[in-house]
Amino acid sequence: MVDTKKLKNEILKILEKKDVKHVICYTAGSYGFQTRPFFISKKEDIEKIIFSPLCLHNLSLYVNNNDEKKIGVVVKGCDSKSVVQLIQEKQLDRKKIIIIGIPCKGVIDPKKLREKISEPLEQVDVKEIKDKYIITFKDKKHEFNKKDLVFDKCLTCEHPTPIIYDVLIDEKIKPTGKEKYEQVKTFEKQTIDNKWKFWEEQFSKCIRCYACRNVCPICFCEECMAEQLNPQWLYRSVNISENTIWHIMRAFHLAGRCTGCGECERVCPMDIPLMLLNKKLEKEIKELYDYIPGTNPENIPLFAMYKPDDPGGDIK
Amino acid sequence: MKRYTIHKQKINDLIKTLLKKYRVIAPVEKNDIILFKQIERPDEIKLDFTNSKIPPKSIFLPQTETLFKFSTDKDIKLETPKNFEETALFGIRPCDAKSLDILKNVFSDEYEDNLFLSKLKNTLFIGLTCKDPPVNCFCTSVDGSPFGTAGLDILLTDIEDKYFVEIITKKGENLLKIFKDLKPVTKKDIEKKTTIAKNAENKIKRHMQTKNIEKILDQIFENNFWGEIAKRCVGCGICTYLCPTCHCFDIQDEKKGKHGARIRVWDSCMYSEYTKQASGYNPRPSQMNRIRNRIYHKFNYFPKNSQVFGCVGCGRCITECPVNIDIIETINDARQVKK
């Protein structure tokens, strides 16, 4: 379990500095399995801060340098990759953010949890004991294997310890997972017709609420192409044709940039497996350029670099 | 109101009878998602469901709807959309039926939107009592009930081996003409129905304090309370698109080659371009203004204009919000804000 006391102490120290606007962290949600982003600026709110395996949001979404003052942010391993990417893309000034890193042992996927127990009104308590979660509410204990409850991304996580931080809560954790792109590889084996049938069904479900875009820390355009009217790149009509354009556009704009936090897939109300698209592009880029976004603070963005031995290098 | 019962084994016969006369739309499960869809056979229906992901407003106000088609061949040709077939909507929940009743007023005020209204008129609404309301239901806080009849022609209640059938409107009586297998109610049936209804109401655990809410909201419009909630809002369209009473739309012309259509398509007040004017000026410049508008529209403007809440307590916006913005909590907390 993460040492919440230490987390609170570190946040208190940051809040004491005069040049800090707020620290973005987590607080309890309104019911059941919910937690929520919390923007703390007053020391007296410190006891509201929580951290548990239900703290699933990637808080780097909320970090910006719009203000003169510094902003603090709590990041797990995967979230820290988005921060690295945002710094590389010059969206964040490293000097103006204070990163509180949390070595992460996995985050519970509420969808998986809901399949096992129906979500109660009472807020649940989660304890980690080795490879088990003990979930308690109404004095009733439920025990689950971690691997059955965590997000798929956690099972293959190679960066449980944040890549970049100013303060680290708890000891570093060695990765136990390995991204082998198994889902992508299985999908690649299908015929083109079957692949298309699959995506046609998935994209048909889309209601274009743009939650996938809005929770993505890397989707930071002030005006998205989806909204432009002149020229109008895609129509407002919600149908398979326009939905497909939207999803291809979204995925390709994130190629070489998506850090795999999985927020888009988590928030999709229609359960579209967006990570399958994102992971396919991640795999292609890894194979072509030996590059994984957000993993090396020394890197420059993929599309800002050129090496003479890049594949497809006939552009002379 | 006329009351009958139908044996559960006969429910498929009822659906088959409906299928002969109507286009039947009912809850269908696909990949764990429940949606209202047209069915061909009774066994396609999912009867034990909580509620559909997308509210059945989408049948009457489709996300994308063609107003007319045009082509720019030599002479301009206009083509009007097809008529809405006579439909039986089977299995709608009382909250969603009530939302359509509310929308009926919206779409018939000043300007009569016949595209919407004619669909309602052409539909037989057969509701299904909520026996097991899930965690975020709060219909009882907004003048509703798990067995409410607003907007319904017929209400079915599962009473173990039978369905309790209440015929609410004249339109509902049409069922009696085409389906003869309804049995008279016994005293025991009525008792069972009353107990089940009461139990359902007791299962609703969350409550929104709505008394005088429009007056309270009048006093806190400028309060920073709204800004605090807006901090974590990501500005997506989930809460409004999945809301059974949200009904805003945009109108656009879409053309491919010589052929095009004027469409209306759902829009959301959560989007930054929703109120953006051609000049570039936006009267709701920040997410705070947008969140506040969503709440005020439902709990201030609606009660003032038509003496009803613009919310039926289905809880979809709470369940689906990516960052736990919870409308019950928002309203309850709004009451505590220092004026």
Image (cartoon, rainbow, N blue to C red):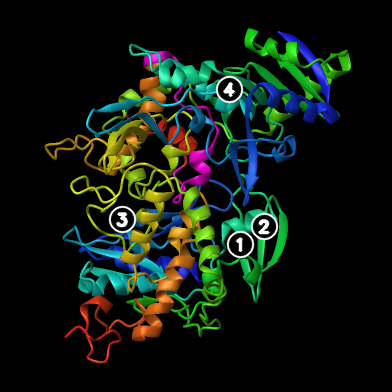
- Discs 3 and 1 lie in a common subunit: yes
Residue of label 2: A136
Secondary element at tag 3: loop
Q: Rounded to the nearest whole Å, what is the CA distance between mark 4 and mark 1? A: 35 Å
Residue of label 4: B144
Task: Locate the C terminus of chain A and report the quarter of the image it occupies.
Answer: bottom left
Q: Rounded to the nearest whole Å, what is the CA distance between mark 4 and mark 3? A: 40 Å
Q: Is residue B269 above or below residue B232?
A: above
- Discs 2 and 1 lie in a common subunit: yes
* Percent x, y of residue B302: 39, 20
Secondary element at tag 2: strand
Q: In this view, does B119 lie above or below A4?
A: above
The label number, if any, that marks residue A126 in the structure image = 1
- Discs 4 and 1 lie in a common subunit: no
- Residue range in magenta is B305-325
**Chain where mark 3 sits:** A
The label number, if any, that marks residue A41 in the structure image = 3
